[in-house]
Amino acid sequence: MDENPPPPRTCCSATLKQVLCGFIVSAGMVQAGLVTGWPAVLPDLQNDTSAAFNVTDDDVKWIVSCTSIVGMATNLLAGSMMEWVGPRLLLSLLLMPASGFWLLQCFAPNLPIFYMGRLGGGFVASVFTTLTNPLMAELVEPHLRGMLSCLPELVVSSGVLVVYVLSYVLPWQVVTGLCALPFLPLFCLSLVIPESPFWLVRKGKLVEAENALQKLRDPRKNVARDELPSIRTSIMSHPQTTVMDQIKQLRVDYHAKPVILLVAIFILRELGGQLAVFSYTVYLFQKAGVEIEVFTCTVLVGIVRLLATATSSILVDKLGRRPFLFGTFLVCGIAQTTGGAFLLADIPGTDWVPLVAVLIFVLAYGLGVGPIPWILLGELIPTPVRSIGASICTFSFCASQFFVGVLFPELMATLGVGGSFLVFSGANFLTSIFTFVFLPESRGRSLHQLQEVFSTRTSRRPLINVASNEASEEVNDSS
């Protein structure tokens, strides 16, 4: 008999609890995926003579873009809602209305009612987009954060693919109705997730915060001694309980810098044309004259994005955020330049090149461009401004997405698909350079450590030096 039995596998139990929690928190982002991919049914809706209303080409532009309009307004309020209600409770409260908005679209008797459903769905998706990654970062430990923070984008990719496939085989109204199904079970599962311990500390609920941490951590770990003090320190050093307090904290240089950095990344990312590829997929392939059946190409795009995002969740903690994001933005730019050039040249026998270029773009997007900015949203925004900072970043994301969604049809009509790709490629090349120069590495750091990256002590150095120094510090820590 073994005299020294192995210790109980409580660490694995804690990991499993945090992974399950991450899956449940991320699952709400299926709404964002469904909203993004749903325009794939619009050609079928336009051709449906039995529909209760007609959809013109001009309507298509606004149906695609209206979710970004409501997103801009929503994201300015999302930080206040998170601070007032609590991010986990807000997640639960909005899951059920999500189903109602899809059913409103499905059974709309006229176009205005249809728009109400679309706008409501966009509202829910925007709130989830704002709260998911910050909530995830505040619930899980640093060594799991990279992998689990990729889950929201993986869920979004799954939602996009599901709509693409369903729109290929089912009428638009059935597809819209099926989009309402996931949210009742998700509501029930969300009730078992503890509230954010950071939010609980901000509200002075220290016992509840300790209990929330203990539910997700190794039972052998004394969270009151090991983790709760660092949370209290990061918050009490800049005490704030209201949104106005957070706005005041944004005047502090090292609180504003990471927010400005992420705003720039989100705006440049959207100017790189991801909305055009994923929401106008069917129309894009039709205009490009790809010989393969258009919906087959669309489903292929969804599959590649899903597989790439799943791969990203494995690699992002091994390769680091900064090099991964720089490399994938660069590949997106190269793919768009190649596809655009071949479309403009119109060389016989090369119709397959634009399709391959789009798939390479989607691959690079799924690996880094898509998920990593959302990971950074949860990691880099300092605790004293986390809610309002996340709102500002997602507002900039929605505003730039609306800009691209409205202008892309006109851009495509003026420059063609090839010319549009060349314009988008310029934005991706610019973003790759911006990322390389200014983005610090965040892999393996606790939220308290990341808050120090932009502090007065480090903010006097260029961010590129901060990035390299953080990497060397990490090596020293591991030694």
Image (cartoon, rainbow, N blue to C red):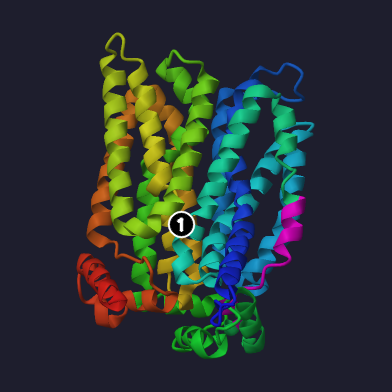
Q: Is residue 5 magenta?
A: no
Of residues 281 and 366, the one drawn nearer to the viewer in this rendering: 366
The residues colored magenta run: 184-200
Q: Is residue 186 magenta?
A: yes
**Left or right relative to 284: residue 354:** left
- At a point 28% along the width and 47% down the height, the residue shown is 327
Circle 1 Cα neighbour tier, 10 Å, few/some/many (<14 / 14–19 / ≥20): many
To which quarter of the image does residue 143 belong? Answer: bottom left
- Which residue is most to the top? 348
Q: Percent x, y for residue 151? A: 53, 54
Of residues 305 and 32, the one drawn nearer to the viewer in this rendering: 305
Of residues 227 and 176, the one drawn nearer to the viewer in this rendering: 227
Q: Percent x, y for residue 24? A: 64, 58
Q: Secondary structure at mark 1?
A: helix
Q: Is residue 59 something one can see in this rendering?
A: no
Location of the C terminus by quadrant is bottom left
To which quarter of the image does residue 329 belong? Answer: top left
**Left or right relative to 221: residue 413:** left
Q: Is residue 472 something one can see in this rendering?
A: yes
Q: Which residue is mark 1?
A: 374
Disc 1 residue type? Trp
**Left or right relative to 330: residue 300:** right
- At a point 50% along the width and 30% down the height, the residue shown is 280
Vertical arrangement, residue 276 with respect to residue 194, above or below = above
Q: Percent x, y for residue 26? A: 59, 56
Vertical arrangement, residue 193 with respect to residue 324, above or below = below
- At a point 72% along the width and 60% down the height, the residue shown is 189
- Which residue is most to the front? 1
Location of the N terminus by quadrant is bottom right
Q: Percent x, y for residue 353? A: 33, 21
- At a point 35% along the width and 58% down the height, the residue shown is 318
